[in-house]
Image (spheres, rainbow, N blue to C red):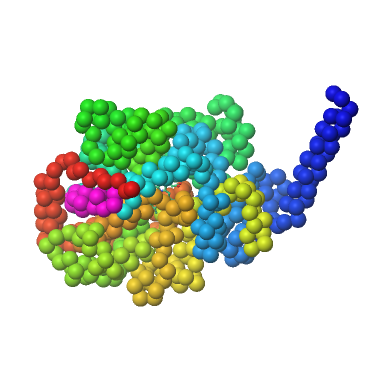
Amino acid sequence: MPLLLVDIAAALMAGLVLLFMLDSWRRKGQHLPPGPPGLPFLGNILQIPRKKEFIVFRDLGNIYGDIVTLRVPGQIFVILNSRKAVADLLDARSQLYSDRPRTIMCKDLIGWDGSVVLSDNTPRFRDCRKLLRKGLGPSAVQSFIPFLNRQSAFYLENLQKRPEAFVDIFKRNAAAISMKIAYGYDGIQDDEELYGIGAMANHYFAETAVVGVWPVDMLPILRHVPQWFPFAYFKKYAAHAKPIVLESVNRPFEETKRHMKRGTAGGSFTSMLLEDAKGDPDTEDCIKWSGTGIFLGQMDTTTSALSWFFLSMALHPEVQAKAQAEIDKVVGNERLPRFEDKESLPYVSAVMQEVFRWHPVVPMIPHALSKDDEYRGYFIPAKTSLIGNIWAIMHDESLYPDAEDFRPERFTEDGAPDCLNVAFGFGRRVCPGILIAQAHVFVSIATTLATFNITKARDAQGNIIEPVIEDTPGAINFPQPFKVSLEPRSAAAADLIRRSAEHSRTLPERLEIFSLDA
Ligand code: HEM
C-alpha cells in the first residue's frame, strides 16, 4: 500500500478510537437512575425474587424514587413505579420505548419468535398492529356484541351445571369467543383438542415471558448447551413446549385456509384478511401471528380478571348486594344484562374497574428502548428494559388510598383516576384487545351478578373456608386456587338462565359477526 494511504488509514483508525473513547467517557459521565448496589458480575440478580417482583420493585421505589435501576448480567432494567414516569416515557416517547427486552427462552427456544407481543417495533410489527386495529377496532367490536350477549347465556348455563369448575368455564368461554373472532369457529366444541393445545401454549408463554427469570435470557451463550448438560433443564422444557406452541399457531390458520378453499369458512379476522392479502406470504405470516394474538390473548387474561372478580365478591357481600340492586333496578329480572346496559350501570362498571385495579391481570409489562435517551437528567442507554410496574401504580396510595381494600366507591364517589388506561399497557404497545376484553369482562360480571350469589365455600362440617388472597408468579396474575359457593339468586334467576340459553340456541349457528375497521 502506498505510504500516503497507510497514513490516511492510520489517521482514520485513530479518529475512530478517539470517537469511541469520547463516547464512552460521555456515557460514564452520565448517570443511570439510582438503584441498590449490586454484587460484582452478578449485579442485582439476587435481589430479584421469582415471585411478586412487583412488590419488591415498588418497595425499592420507596427508597430510591419512582425510577429505579437494577442490573443483571448483560441487561439493565429501569423500573417505572409511577403513573408519571410511565406516561412520560412509555406513552409520550413511545416511538423510542416500544421494543421488547430479549427473551431467548420464550422467543427463540420455545417458538414464539413470530409473535406480535414479543416483537420489536419493526416495520413487520407495525403491519401486524395495523391488522389488529382493523380486526379489533370499535366497529369490528360492535359487530361482536350480539355474539357476546348470545354467548353469555351459555356461560351462565355452564356455571349452573358445574359451579365448582368456574375457572375452567371462564377459560372455555374466552376460548369460544376468541376462536370465533380469530378463525370463525362456532365454540370450542368445533375443536376441543385445539382448545387444549392453546391452553398449554398459553401456559408456556406465561412461564417463559417473564424477564429476568430464565438463566439463558441473562447468559445467551447457554442456548448452545446440549440437552443432556447438567442444569440444562430449560432445554428439555423447550424441546417439550415448542411443538405445542407451533401447533397452536399453525393448525387453526391452516384449517381456516382449507375452509376458505371449500367455501365453508365463517366470517373471521383470519378469513377476511386473507382474502385481502391475495397470497402475499409476508402479509399471510402477519395474519397468522396476529390471529394467534387474538386466539391466545383473550384466554388467560379474561380468566384472571374473572377469577379475581369471584374472589372479591365472596369476600365482599355488601359490594355484591349493591351491584345486584343496581342491576335489578335498571335491567329488571326478565332479561339478562347486555353490553348495551353498561352506561346505565355505573356501580357495576366501577366493580369491574376495581377488579382490574385490585390485583392487575398483567402486574408488570416490559418495554425496551431503541436509542440512548435522557430523562430527568439521567442517562438511559439503548436496549435498557423498562418495566412498567402496573401493580405499583394501581397501589399508589396517593391515587388510590387504602389500596389493598376492594372498594368500587373510589371510582363512583371519590373520583379516583380511571385505571383502565393503565391495566392494558402503554403507548404503541397498548393492548389491541382492550375493547373486546372490556366488553367480555363487563358482560360476564353483569350477567353473573344478575343471576348468582357468590359466597365463601363451606367444608363438609359446614365451616366457612376462608379464601387466601395470594398472587401466583408468571406474566399473567391469577389468584391461588380458591373455592366459592355459587347459587342461583332465586328460582326466577335459574329460570332466566334456562330461558336465555334456550333462546340463544335458536339463533343461527353461524352468526356472521365480522366487520373490519378502516
Ligand atoms: C383482561 C383482559 C386483558 C388485559 C388486562 C390485557 C392487557 C395487556 C397488556 C398490559 C398488554 C401489554 C401492553 C404493553 O406492552 O404496554 C397486552 C398486549 C396484548 N394484548 Fe392484551 N389484555 C387483555 C385482553 C386481550 C384480548 C382480549 C386480546 C385479543 C383479542 C389481547 C391481545 C393482546 C395482544 C396481541 C398484545 C400484544 C400487543 C403488542 O405487543 O404490541 N389482549 N395486553
Residue 370 x %, y %: 59, 47
Task: Name the residue at 22% across, 40% down.
Answer: 186
Q: Give the range drawn in magenta.
A: 139-157
Decide if residue 195 is in sight here: no
Image quarter for residue 360? bottom left
Quarter of the image for residue 404 reads bottom left
Residue at the spot x=33%, y=62% of the render?
Answer: 352
Does the image show residue 88?
Answer: yes
Which one is nearer the viewer's eye here, 141 or 321? 141
- Please state which of residues 54 and 112 is positioned toward the viewer in this rendering: 112
Magenta stretch secondary structure, dominant: helix
Q: Where is residue 173 in the image (x, y as percent from the top left)?
A: 26, 47
- Nearest the viewer among 263 and 434 is 263
Identify the residue at the far bottom of this view. Answer: 413
Left of 101 or right of it: where is 128?
A: left
Looking at the rendered structure, the number of numbered marks drawn on it comes to: 0
